[in-house]
Amino acid sequence: MGDSEVFLKLRRQLKEAEEERIKAAQYGLELLESQSDLQNQLEEQRSEMTTTIENLEQDKFSLQREVELKNRMLESVTSECDNIKQQLKISLEQLQVQLERTHNREVSDLKDKLEKLKAELDEARLSEKQLKHKLDYQSEVLANKSEELRLMSERVHETMSSEMLTLQLEKTELESAKDILEEEINELQYRQQQLVLTNTNQSRQVERLQEEKDEREKEAVAYFSALEKARETNQELQCQLDQALQQAQDPNSKGNSLFSEVEDRRAEMERQLIGVKVQYQSLQKQHAFSRQQMHRMKQNSENEQTGKNSNPGQEDETYYVDLLKMKLDNSSKEIEKIKDELSLQRMKALAESQRVLELERKLFTNERQLKLSQTENMKLRVNLDEIKMKYEPDEMVNFRIQKRRREQLPLDCPSENPADHNIMARNAADLPPETLKESEECSTGHTEDHSSKTSNPAPAEEPVGPVSTQQSKAAKGHSVKERKRVRIVEDENKVHTLNKSGTNDCSNPATSPRSKTEDASIETKKPEERETRKNERKSRLKAQPVLYVSSKPASVTQCPQQ
């Protein structure tokens, strides 16, 4: 009985263990299924997140483009407004200046006419006054004369002596002379008055001309100051243009690389996008607040409509609600219109940007063609000059380089004539440094030829007698005489060398004929001494420098260079 119970217990435990195992397997399957479901959900969420991120990126890019277009539009509009304002200001200033000038001219013309009329009026008044005075005087004279004639006629009938008659005649003559003098005095007074009047008119005219002169001087000073300001602004703009060109040509600057420009624009767009986001959030808050207020207003309006029958005095508040609704509808319509206009402006901005790009490409191609045409023009000019030099040498004589004569003076002559050395040094000092440089450059080839000639002399025959020694000395003297060379340089490619044997050469060692005793002494010298002399002469020729002295004076050589 005890064994069977133990066996039953073990079976029960085994069944329980199997049931638990089955349950564990079921739970494991359920966990696997739930894990696979979670993985599927995670993948779906990942795909959704990627799509949302892509959409957000696209929205971000579109917003960036819109912001860029808006900025471009704003910049273009502001630049156009500024240009229009500047043009209007300039045109307004020009019109004001023109109106002032015309007004001043008209005023000056009217002043001139008024002065002329005043002068004519004064002259007419003076002449009228003078004529009246003259008429009165003539009438008085006429009355006096008539009275005198009457008295004379009365006295004629009376008996009168001859002396009384003569005295009466003299009296009449004197009175007539007095009248003539009075008339002359009056005429002189009239002339004086006219001159005084003309003097006053001329003084007025001089004052007016002085005022005009002062005004013109002021205008000239204003024009000069404006010109100086324009020059200063032009110089500043030129400096700015040079700086901009240098910055554009500088490879280290940011503006020269496309990636740096894109990076700068991207940073600017990100900043602007952040600002737009902040503005959008603030607008959303305002919109939510306005919606809440509208909801409250609607509730209040509904409450008012329900209580309208009981409270008929609240109709005024419904009127304000309707007014706000109408304003809201109008604002929504205006927002739609603004959106439509914004889309149109975007399209226009895109078209303008495309047109600007095309114009920049055309400008770049035109600049390239201009550079190519300039290079071709320079090549054609060079070819034309070569053709002129080839086929028309007479016409190109004026363009040739000035001829210079250079003389090579040997320095191995004995120092018997110090005056010659002083003259040579003075001529060399008078030459400008440019001619000395050219002479040194041209002398290199000549010194090499001369050194090659002197370094490879012909083998001299051994002396046999006095005649042979004299011939050898004469040959040496002739070779020393021929050391003086003259070089005339016409062009860079045309060099003519002439060997000039001067009679007054300082390199001639024997100025007087040799005696027989000297020839005999020369014959007795050893050949070793001759070889040493030759070597010394060669080393002297190689070591000493060569001076070039122009045959023309210093003033002639300096004039074309100046």
Image (cartoon, rainbow, N blue to C red):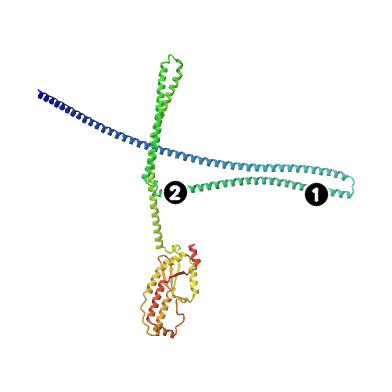
The quadrant where residue 122 appears: top right
State whether residue 42 appears in this view: yes
Percent position of residue 166, x then y: 86, 50
Identity of the residue furthest to the front in this view: 2
Q: Residue at x 57, y 45 (%)?
A: 219
Which of the two residues, 68 or 395, is positioned nearer the viewer here?
68
Q: Amino acid at mark 1?
A: Ala
Of 91 and 162, the residue lying toward us? 91
| Residue identified by numbered label 1 | 177
| Residue that extends furthest to the top in the rendered view of this protein | 310
Quadrant location of the N terminus?
A: top left
Residue in the picture at 39% in, 78% down: 532
Splitting the image into 4 quarters, where does residue 34 fall? top left
Residue 350 location, quadrant:
top left
- The secondary element bearing badge 1 is classed as helix
Q: Residue 68: x and y, percent?
A: 39, 38
When the figure is inspected, residue 432 is found, relative to residue 299, above or below; the finding is below
Q: Amino acid at mark 2?
A: Gln
Say if residue 402 shows up in the picture: no
Where's residue 445, x and y in %?
Answer: 39, 68
Q: Which mark is residue 283?
A: none
Q: How many marks?
A: 2
In the depicted structure, whether residue 267 falls above or below residue 6: below
Q: Nearer the viewer, residue 525 or 24?
A: 24
Dot 2 falls on a residue whose secondary structure is helix
Q: x%, y% of residue 405?
A: 45, 69
Q: CA distance from mark 1 to mark 2?
A: 96 Å
Residue underneath mark 2: 243
